[in-house]
Image (cartoon, rainbow, N blue to C red):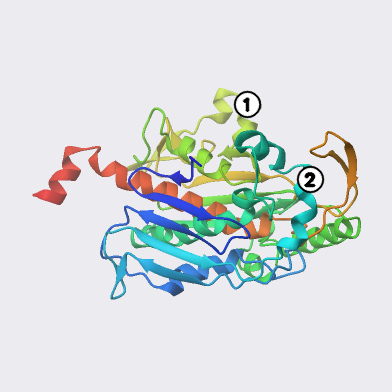
Amino acid sequence: MAGSSFGTDFKITTWGESHGSALGVVVDGCPAGLYLDKADIQAFLDRRKPGQSKYTTTRAEGDEVEIMSGVFEGKTTGTPISLIVYNKDQHSSDYSEIASYYRPGHADYTFDEKYGFRDFRGGGRSSGRETIGRVAAGAIASKILKTLNISLLCYTASIGDIDIDYDRFDMAQALLNPLCMPDAEAAVKAGEYLDSLRSDGNSSGGIIECRISGLPAGIGEPVFDKLDAELAKAVMSIGAVKAVEIGDGVKASRSTGLDNNDSFEIKDGKAVKKTNHSGGTLGGISDGSDVLLRAHFKPTPSVSASQTTVNKDNEEITVNIKGRHDPIIVPRAVVVVESMAAVTVTDLLIRNLSSRIDNLKKIYL
């Protein structure tokens, strides 16, 4: 299977299946000398693991990570870092029935068409558990960014048609409620909405916002590897994401030039933007403002209510999906979006070292 790697100089390769013995990631290109231990990575994995609220699957996985290589005496060595997480609560029998038919909204049909067969146990590589490797890699990238005073703030911005109110924005609330919403009132309403969907055997989608602060101007390659293009690819590669916006996003298409342009001013002897409609990028290169991206997630396709589909004998049938599934994946996906953004920015920062001769002089002279 091609396409399991992402990045150029800071490169990650994820591996493993939902119901295989383990999943993991190989991170290549991490600079030597970074203090790194298991706790750094486990803190990120704990944010995405299942079974933490009634809004997540009841699959009981501790998702404990082991560092297999690339770290010695508490610091990275510059060699590939291999990380592994063992699966311990697979119920493959829950999925034996679906081997004969195609679940609506899943990759069953397309995998069969592409490969001639598929791993029907939880979706194999198309399962959300594939993101374990992304999150483990994101923990390393985030630690690199922290040393450069670059931070990422991600949270649930909406569930269904329930949006957070930015006048009530409180990031501490996102750490207190299971929906990761930085608005206590919106979280209560969203919880009630999800409870009604669960009772009907249904599910919901939502939006995750990610804000990257402290990124210096000049990051991103200005043609095919633009900062916003790389971020969009990274986030769109997450299984359930159907759209990505940067800055004003789709609203820009209904705006005017005078409204959408970000005027400049001099502040503390430096050129800065008065507004940030562009979302922190101009011409695909960071402009020193916060980078703002928005990821739109579709509803969880595995719902217990009856659905129509077809089987391998080309018969039309009605099915009720069994197994343990999230009524919404957005809260657990917050750290996945954050991780992919961190990996992307880290890769572009390292690539940017060769953009100016002055940078090379600082290193080698």
Circle 1: is it few (<14), some (14-19), or many (20+) Cα within 10 Å?
few
Q: Nearer the viewer, mark 2 or mark 1?
A: 2
Residue 114 higher or lower than 48, as above or below = above
| Residue 342 falls left or right of residue 352 | right
Residue 170, given in percent of the width and then of the height, sits at: 63, 63
Residue 44, given in percent of the width and then of the height, sits at: 52, 66
Report the Cα–Cα distance between label 2 and label 1: 44 Å
User: According to the image, label 2 marks what residue?
Assistant: 100
Q: Residue furthest left?
A: 365
The residue lying at 85 percent from left, 62 percent from top is 195
For badge 1, the amino acid type reads Ser
The residue lying at 15 percent from left, 50 percent from top is 363
User: According to the image, label 1 marks what residue?
Assistant: 253
For badge 2, the amino acid type reads Ser
Residue 281, given in percent of the width and then of the height, sits at: 45, 37
Residue 296, given in percent of the width and then of the height, sits at: 66, 44
Residue 54 higher or lower than 338, as above or below = below
Which is nearer the eye, 312 or 186? Answer: 312
* Residue at disc 2, secondary structure: helix
Question: Does any portion of residue 212 appear in the rendered image?
Answer: no
